Image: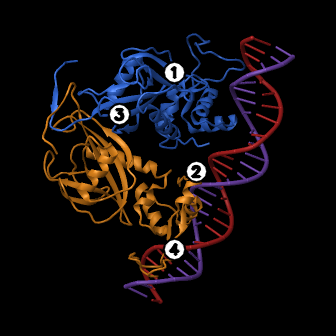
Chain colours: A blue, B orange, C red, D purple
Amino acid sequence: MEKGMYTYKYPHAALTADCVVFGFDGWSLKVLLIQRAKGPYESFWAFPGGFMEMEETTEECARRELCEETGLVVSGLRLFGVFSDVGRDPRERVVSVGYYALAKEVEVEGGDDAAQAQWWEIDRVPPMAFDHRTMLRQALRQMRRDIHFEPVGFELLGERFTLGEVQRLYESVLGVRFDRRNFCKKMLQTGVLKAAEAEASVGEGEGKEWPVGRRGRLYCFDREGYEHMKGGFRLEF
Amino acid sequence: MEKGMYTYKYPHAALTADCVVFGFDGWSLKVLLIQRAKGPYESFWAFPGGFMEMEETTEECARRELCEETGLVVSGLRLFGVFSDVGRDPRERVVSVGYYALAKEVEVEGGDDAAQAQWWEIDRVPPMAFDHRTMLRQALRQMRRDIHFEPVGFELLGERFTLGEVQRLYESVLGVRFDRRNFCKKMLQTGVLKAAEAEASVGEGEGKEWPVGRRGRLYCFDREGYEHMKGGFRLEF
DNA sequence: TCAAAAGTGTTCGCATTACACCCATGG
DNA sequence: CCATGGGTGTAATGCGAACACTTTTGA
């Protein structure tokens, strides 16, 4: 960072991008927060994010900050809101662009400005900095809407998964319960899943932790199938 | 506007809000553009919008600029995108927040920076400034998505309207045709419409221009009905 | 009286729903 | 052998899709 001063004829607000990352551990929906190490709201929890640099887009900024602060690399970022209330940051006028992402829940650790990074149950989040509580509500609402039309949920799962996992995922995200038979039927007939090929290598375990009971058949996301069923992806239930 | 200089320790992008206003004249979907009177892209067409001031939110900014440049006052503004590509404005680094709105098509006239303001058929827009062509595509996509779930379309109509008008509206917006009987059936059973009370005053005309043929029954939007049918608003067809 | 738009009801097929039993696995 | 979760089919119902004729009105 250089130390020079930047001057403008008119006042400029600062721009930040924040990243609401949802995760899924197989049973419940989580959200990734960092604990602020300094500045306003020190020790409060917040979404990874930070000030946009001049040679990046807001989306690139969100991705970069997420990586710097948690080590996480995500694929899809989706805009869910712009937060521009005048007093929302005590330091200066700050406008934040909010993105959300979905990720398989993995170990994360703090870096940078973050004392630590941690997954929190979606409905048991700690006190949050700035207007981040509001942001969470909006991100969640947007994501719940999107998941009906885009097979966005699969980003929360591993490469291979069982129908049971998919069902638990949708149930966690939407907060409802489905009939297992109807769920499988519908999910399969959307054509976005294909049976995962029997693993040639190990032929076993694969690191999956099976709970108890019969093992589910493994599927994986079928991008082909999704592409040319143009828009027919509707998960209503 | 004061003339002072504003200095910051780090470079700040400028922030603007732009407003994509869709209109409906009873037959086709339009979009409101202004012709730029100066600056880069002079004489090109663009969306109403401009730089955010320090004591307003981005949404308030969009509303203010829209009014200053076209005289239009709209109710609902909906975020549809943030545009932050590095080179999108030749003057300086500018990040634009895009909102869309729906309005009954009325006479508009330019003001301010705008040489003139004019409604354009949605698929016959003139050359546009900056990345506004891209913005239009995104705004349209977002609006088409929203209209399925929120009775957003009625903002495009007057206080009272016929089912035929509603149907033409949906057909224009979505670019499809519906069976009239099925459309009426479904639209009525959503419960968001109620019969407009027979006008006590004039008892006639009311300024509506009837084309030819039988006159349709008049309805109006029923906010009550919409509120407590929580989420059941789905226009799939 | 003709053209244009509005109003209305039925049938068919598919998709959603509800529902129960057996199988595989690990403890 | 028992608890847990996986896998599967059928019957009833509801909703969307298709479809034609009559009425009103202005020209």
Q: Crowdedness of circle 2 by 10 Å Cα count: few (<14), some, many (20+)?
A: few
Q: Crowdedness of circle 4 by 10 Å Cα count: few (<14), some, many (20+)?
A: few
Q: Report the disc number at residue B73.
A: none
Q: Are marks 3 and 4 on the same chain?
A: no
Secondary structure of the residue carrying numbered label 2: loop
Q: Amino acid at mark 2?
A: Lys
Residue identifier under label 2: B230
Q: Is residue B36 left or right of residue A228?
A: left
Q: Amino acid at mark 4?
A: Arg
| B175 and A123: which is toward the camera | A123
Residue identifier under label 4: B217
Q: Are marks 2 and 4 in contact (CB under 8 Å)?
A: no
Pick the quarter of the image with the N terminus of chain A. Answer: top left
Q: Residue at x 38, y 19 (%)?
A: A67
Disc 1: host chain? A
**Picture layout, residue A1 above or below residue B28:** above
Q: Crowdedness of circle 1 by 10 Å Cα count: few (<14), some, many (20+)?
A: many
Q: Residue at x 27, y 56 (%)?
A: B67
Q: Report the disc number at residue A96.
A: 3
The span from disc 3 to disc 2 (Cα, nearest Å) is: 31 Å
Which of the marked residues, 2 or 4, is nearer the chain's N terminus?
Answer: 4
Residue identifier under label 1: A119
